[in-house]
Amino acid sequence: MKRFATMHSCLAGILALMACAASHATISHPLDPLEDFEILGAANILLAGHAAKPGAIFQSIELREPSKSSVLAFHPGASIPRAAQVFWRQDKKSYRSIVDLSHGTFTPPVLIPRSDGQLGLTITEVSDFSFAFQDPRLLAARASVRELGTPP
């Protein structure tokens, strides 16, 4: 099992770097939004580097804008360094990191303290209310409604 996990991590890292390398062919300006392969590449770089665990929920992956001086110095055809700011949840904790898409590296993950708030829910999480139907309080409330003869 460990061998499979290691092979999976290596493959994910290789795919992420290949995707990020391809970005230079389609990105024409430093402020262009992230392409789909860059978004997937950022997540895969964090997974391959074991910063994020399989099953992590990636809440937000967005362009980390370059400095104003870099944007002003840009000339068409020049290479464009790309980075993404990534927020994710795992093990009931929230984290953030900056992923350098051009080099396949990332800053150490920073734990976001609960006192700073919670990351928003993803569409999948909002649409999955199955957890509510396992809550004893909800089940008791539904039983009370039934006793009154009102359909739940």
Image (cartoon, rainbow, N blue to C red):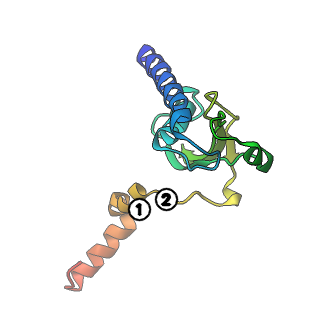
Tell me whether circle 1 and circle 2 mark residues in contact (CB < 8 Å): yes
Name which residue lies at 33% across and 71% down: 140
Q: Which percent across, then down, holds residue 87?
A: 59, 48
Is 19 drawn above or below residue 66 in the view shown? above
| Residue bearing the label numbered 2 | 121
Amino acid type of disc 1? Val
Question: At numbered mark 2, what does the secondary structure look like: helix, strand or loop?
Answer: loop
Residue 77: image quadrant is top right
Q: Which mark is residue 137?
A: none
Amino acid type of disc 2? Leu
User: What is the distance, in whole Å, between disc 1 and disc 2 at their CAs?
Assistant: 6 Å
Residue 144: image quadrant is bottom left
Q: Which percent across, then down, holds residue 117?
A: 65, 61
Is residue 53 found left or right of 94 in the rendered image?
Answer: left
Is 11 drawn above or below residue 55 in the view shown? above
Name which residue lies at 70% across and 35% down: 107
119 vs 139, nearest the viewer:
119
135 vs 76, nearest the viewer:
76
Q: Which percent across, then down, holds residue 137?
A: 39, 68
Label whose residue precedes the other's in the sequence (1 or 2): 2
| Residue bearing the label numbered 1 | 126
Name which residue lies at 32% across and 62% down: 133
Q: Quadrant of the C terminus?
A: bottom left
Q: Quadrant of the N terminus?
A: top left
146 vs 73, nearest the viewer:
73
Within 10 Å of the Cα at label 2, are there few (<14), some (14-19), or many (20+) other Cα atoms? few
Question: At numbered mark 1, what does the secondary structure look like: helix, strand or loop?
Answer: helix
